[in-house]
Amino acid sequence: MSNFIESVLDSNVGRSLMKSVLPKSIELKRYNPNQATYFEGRVLIGAGENAALLSDIMRNLKDANASVFFPAAAKTAAAIVAAAGEYGIKAVGIECSTDMTDKFDAFVFDASGFADTADLNQLYYFFNPVMRKLNNNGRVIVLGRPHMKAATGEQAAAMRALEGFSRSVAKEIGKKSATAQAVYVETGAEKNLDAAFRFVISAKSAYVDGQVLTVRKAQDVAYPDWHKPLAGKVALVTGASRGIGESIARTLARDGATVLGLDIPPAEGDLRRVMAEIGGETLLGDISSAEAPQQISDKLKEMGGGDIIVHNAGITRDKTLANMPEHWWNMTIDINLSAEERINHVLFEQGTLNNGGRIICVSSMNGIAGQTGQTNYAASKAGVIGYVQYMADELMTKDITINAVAPGFIETAMTDAIPLMTREIGRRLNSLSQGGKPVDVAETIAFFANPAASGVSGNIVRVCGQSLVGA
């Protein structure tokens, strides 16, 4: 019977029926390498009193093709105009109301000056009149300070409130394929904001929604070319022959990196094809083998050392815990987690990772939310998160960052094999009502790899369209 139902649903009639029942989505606008700049459109800027990031916001908008507006009646109007003037931007004051005909491509609000929870009403005053004026594929960005660095409990509460606010806004605007993020910037890290700001306002973050980024004070401040930020860098990508790994390799190469693609010998044909197409190099091996860490280190040294390490390779071996063979458990933990630790240890010990290095790990939504039949996989991917968060402080002292992505429903050959109805429902269980693409994961990894992201470390970013499960 299930095969019959599946065949009906896969027919033209079945597809039409599903389209009429399941939520419809607006196609996401993704980054086009041929576009002139990272963002183009109309931006409405707001700020609370004592906002400290306006100048940094304008520093980034000067390199975009942006028209900047602000509420003329805002108490902080003069501060916005002054910050814009620093970079030759003419900010235009407008009357904001529910009756206005203007529409915008981004709302940016600087809440870094909030002192206590009474200041939260400034969010309401800015956003309430204009929420219906956001265009499809628009962006909402709220900037603040990390709540654990606050001066008082009241200020901490106000800053932590920004996260709940932005996540809720994301759910309200998702039907427009618009996204909302919160960006926390440590005091002293203002010059390190650029990579994070440009990522979340650009089409590169199309499938990243309802997320929180923290920008820390870093030793280095870099302003690379936006189109080729990874020029001269060497990047290792494990599991690079197909799917998400292939997209990561292609995206890093697009941004200027020389890619060392690694995969198992059975994937040699696909791996060599991909590396030939992007001008990369090939390394065959099993990351869980005892020899792998040294093989990787030796090859990277031949290439002048590694600048970017992307731990993408992984497996699933799914069974409920009561039915799971011991070797399935051990294999999944070893490949998905322990192998990454061993490789990193050798790279650190032998100095193979160059100054300003980037380590990016691939976790999973199931490592955050859990999943029936995936106790081994979820444990391994949650372990990745723990490793990243612990290592961030230690590595920042060495000018190395470490972050992770946690993909949700990403359209790959694996998801194509899921029964149709399950697949159609699964891809819509997020605020954007659609599945992501491998390039969405790759763009997030490329952001972490950017030299300008020197202050971005210890972050776990879900690439899931704001999935309805998880935190």
Image (cartoon, helix red, strand yellow):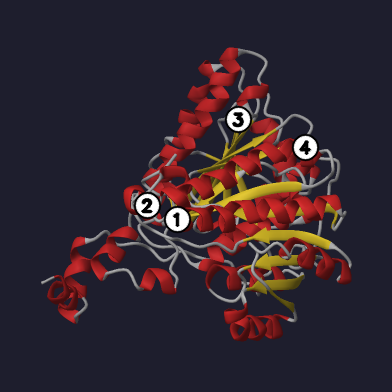
Q: Dividing the picture into quarters, in which one does residue 227 lie?
A: bottom right
Identity, as a three-letter code, of the amino acid under mark 1? Gly
Q: Nearer the viewer, mark 3 or mark 2?
A: 2
Question: How many C-alpha atoms fall within 10 Å of the one at disc 1: few (<14), some, or many (≥20)?
Answer: many
| Label 4: element kind | helix
Q: Position of residue 346 (x, y in %)?
A: 79, 54
Q: Earlier in the sequence, mark 3 or mark 2?
A: 3
Which residue is rendered at x = 56% and y = 44% of the image?
A: 383
Q: Are marks 3 and 2 in contact (CB under 8 Å)?
A: no
Amino acid beneath label 4 = Glu
> Badges 1 and 2: C-beta atoms under 8 Å apart?
yes
Sequence-first tag of 1 and 2:
1
Where residue 122 appears, as percent x and y from the top left, is 52, 26
Residue type indicated by callout 2: Asn
Label 4 belongs to which residue? 394
Spot occupied by residue 390 in the image (x, y as percentages of width and height) = 67, 37
Which quarter of the figure has residue 426?
bottom left
Is residue 2 left or right of 259 when viewed as pictured?
left
Q: Circle 1 is placed at which residue position? A: 408
Verify CB contact (< 8 Å) between mark 4 and mark 1.
no
Earlier residue among tags 3 and 4? 3
Helix, strand or loop under label 3: loop
The answer to whether marks 2 and 4 mark residues whose Cβ atoms lie closer than 8 Å is: no
**Residue kind at label 3, given as amino acid type:** Ala
Closer to viewer: mark 4 or mark 1: 4
Front tag of 3 and 4: 4
Above or below, 427 relative to 103? below
* Residue on which disc 2 sits: 430
